[in-house]
Image (spheres, rainbow, N blue to C red):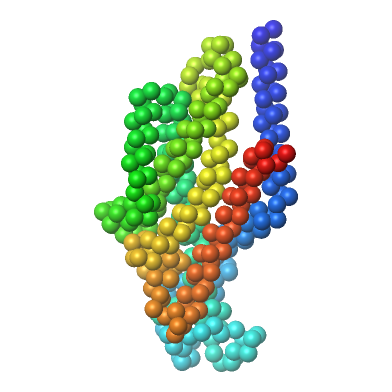
Amino acid sequence: MAEKTETKTTKRRSHRGNSLWHDAMRYLLRQRSAILGMAIIGIMVLIAIFAPLLATHDPIISMLDVPEEASSGIRRRDPPCIHLLGCPEETPQHLLGLDSNLRDLYSRIVYGSRYSLYIGFASVGFAIVIGSVLGAVGGYVGGWLDNVIMRIMDVLLAFPALLLAIAIVTVTGPGLVNALLAIGIVSIPAYARVMRASVISVKERDFVTADRALGASQINILIRRVLPNAITPLIVQGTLGIATAILDAAALSFLGLGAQPPTPEWGTMLGAERNQVFTAPHLVFFPGFMIMLIVLAFNLLGDGLRDALDPRLNR
């Protein structure tokens, strides 16, 4: 009899969980800003996946190494040339022009989407995993362990995130992987605090108390009951955090501490051509515009998720 009652209770919980996410998705699809954000992110993901097909040139090779290009009289920082828009047919077509090293800017922009998305997802994924474990353990166990974890998080939060990331990369050495780890490390406290607060709220609910009364182990309760119900705020925080991670990675690359040339990363491209803002504005505008676009998309999606997952805003 007890087993039947527990099975029915589990089914009701599963139904309520499915209903929550179903309702959240329904509310999310009603928001035009969130739909716009998802559309932009989807396009960026497709561009990153099919970059070899969309790019017209190798993003690393200079056009001087291509015989037909080198003999056509191309110059450094040539502006965009599109034949359909009146560019002479005898001039090689470069949709967004050439950079200071005679590389095709359009191809570098296309391949740059891979690096920016990789940095955003990888660094935030790393921070969420570590931060969630620390926050969940601290919030559920409490006591001295919670105090130790949270004081360490407070120390990390005492430093400006970008300055701390710069310090970490300076010690470990410039490079894309080190920049990714630095961004992930400075992001851990935010996710740890969000998870801790959510776990503290969930662990006092009736269904958790009922599981304790039935003799479930603490680890089983934490993994199967508390964490699934505490993860919602983390999803919103993570979506917004991807935008911040992409901006931080671009800033580190701009300072020469992130991805190193000739890697086609948007921040690196901005840093290399920052002095050409008036003489060759296309070299600065297009990478900057792509950074702005991807950050805007994740912010729009994050705001939409926050509204959709908060019942108080949907009633």
Q: Is residue 70 visible?
A: no
Kindly identify the residue that appears in the image at 53 percent across and 59 percent down. 295
Indicate the quadrant containing the N terminus: top left, top right, bottom left or bottom right: top right
Relative horizontal placement of residue 182, taking residue 198 as reference (left or right): left
Residue 176, picture quadrant: bottom left
- State the count of labels: 0
Could you say which is closer to the camera, residue 156 or residue 55?
156
Measuring from the top left, give residue 204's x and y in whole percent: 54, 22
Measuring from the top left, give residue 180's x and y in whole percent: 40, 53
Could you say which is closer to the camera, residue 51 or residue 77?
77
In the image, residue 58 above or below residue 159 = below
Indicate the quadrant containing the C terminus: top left, top right, bottom left or bottom right: top right
Q: Residue furthest left?
A: 171
Kindly identify the residue that appears in the image at 64 percent across and 86 percent down. 85
Kindly identify the residue that appears in the image at 49 percent across and 65 percent down. 112
In the image, residue 233 above or below residue 229 = below
In the image, residue 71 above or below residue 300 = below
Measuring from the top left, give residue 254's x and y in whole percent: 39, 66
Could you say which is closer to the camera, residue 118 or residue 91?
118
Could you say which is closer to the camera, residue 227 or residue 189?
189
Residue 179, picture quadrant: bottom left
Measuring from the top left, give residue 256's x and y in whole percent: 34, 65
Kindly identify the residue that appears in the image at 70 percent across and 12 percent down. 4
